[in-house]
Image (tube, grey):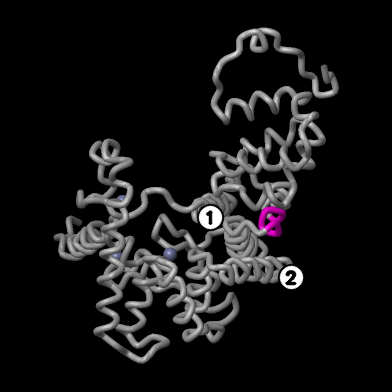
Amino acid sequence: MRTRCGFHFDFESKLRPRKRMRAEVVEESVEKADLFDCLHDDIVIVILSFVSGSAERPSDLLSVMKTCKRMNRLGKSPFVLKKAALESISIGVKNWSQPTHKFLEMCADAGNLEACYLIGMIEFYCLGISNLGGSDGVMFMKKGLRSLIRATKRGHALATYSLAVICFNGGAVRKTGRHLRMGVALCIRAAQLGHVDAMRELGHCYLDGYGVPKNVTKGVQLIRDANARELAAPLNNLSVQSVSASNKQSCHPRKVACDCSPEPHPANRFMAEWFERMKDLGRRVQVCANSNCCRPELRRFEFRRCSTCAFVSYCSRACQVVHWKMDHGVLCTTRTRWLEGLVNAPNRN
Ligand SMILES: [Zn+2]
Ligand SMILES: [Zn+2]
Ligand SMILES: [Zn+2]
């Protein structure tokens, strides 16, 4: 028995043969490194690609890679990293370090589009803002942009929409860095790929003549399509979650039927945690009020404010619409009324 890895021979399970699930076989075989020794590298790589493709958290793949040198080597092969599911690469801020950064880069280089988008967002927004003003900041932003462009070229809808937002809002230095027509072109591409926010943003572009010739009919049609798509989204997986959906509490103060995704994308979750931590460290960064977005402002007064209360700001009109539906529609009016009440209240002194 291999003692190098510190495993002992498990007689009990050997003597008790039974039908096993696939995941169990993988798990158990990994534990007994000797069974893997007689398998060819290619077969092990295929098995590991199943592990990375079905993992529910980053530790699933990493703990397999930690078992021995061979697993570590084979786990880093491009085929395994390319198949890695979003869940297996969505790293939280508290686990962020040089090795995890390197791991994500390796996945992106292997052709994993989700990793490409994730590392692009983290480098452009999080690392870029943290090092803003220095040469490192510019370097990270350029690297992040390159990753986002790479994912966009291969048809990643979220990366395409992110690039559109960057084009609409301009760079970290000046407002003149905006590329409206490019933004519209990217929005059209993302909308074709089925991105609802991109559709909505494009609709507003047509309504306002922002980067495109004004076309109210087309704008209204696009916004209607986006709303219809958003409403239809829960119906698609209704059969799967019919029980959980009926028990689900509405996350909105207005108690409307929830059509927004309750779970933010790992990239947005990372940004939320990152800027929360920066705030704790004493650096205030203005982020988009839509909690499923949390993009930061690259320069002061970059984002549009809510015209009614001016308390919150948004990276895009799509985010404003989503947040209005989520809860700001209620909070905004109450705040205004509260302020009115404050002004109209009789002075007690
Ligand atoms: Zn909701
Ligand atoms: Zn936003
Ligand atoms: Zn408001």
Q: CA distance from mark 1 to mark 2?
A: 24 Å
Where are the magenta residues, as a range?
105-110
Work out whether residue 148 or residue 242 is closer to the camera in this orientation and state it.
Answer: 242
Q: Is residue 224 left or right of residue 62?
A: left
* Crowd class of label 2 (few under 14; some 14 to 19; many from 20; radius 10 Å): few
In the displayed structure, does residue 324 sit left or right of residue 168? left
Instruction: Inspect the magenta stretch and tell me whether residue 108 lies in it.
Output: yes
Residue positioned most to the right: 4
* Ligand 2 within 8 Å, label 1 CB: no
The secondary structure type at the circle numbered 2 is: helix
Tell me what residue is drawn at x 69 percent, y 50 percent: 79
Q: What residue is disc 1 on?
A: 267
Which quadrant of the render holds ligand 2?
bottom left
The location of residue 137, given as percent across then percent down, is 68, 67
Amino acid type for the residue under numbered disc 2:
Ser
Residue 345 occupies which quadrant of the picture?
bottom left
Res 296 label: none
Residue name at image x 52 percent, y 84 percent: 179
Amino acid on which the number 1 mark rests in the picture:
Ala
Please identify the quadrant where the C terminus is shown: bottom left
Q: Does residue 250 show up?
A: yes
Give residue 93's position: percent from left, percent from top.
59, 47
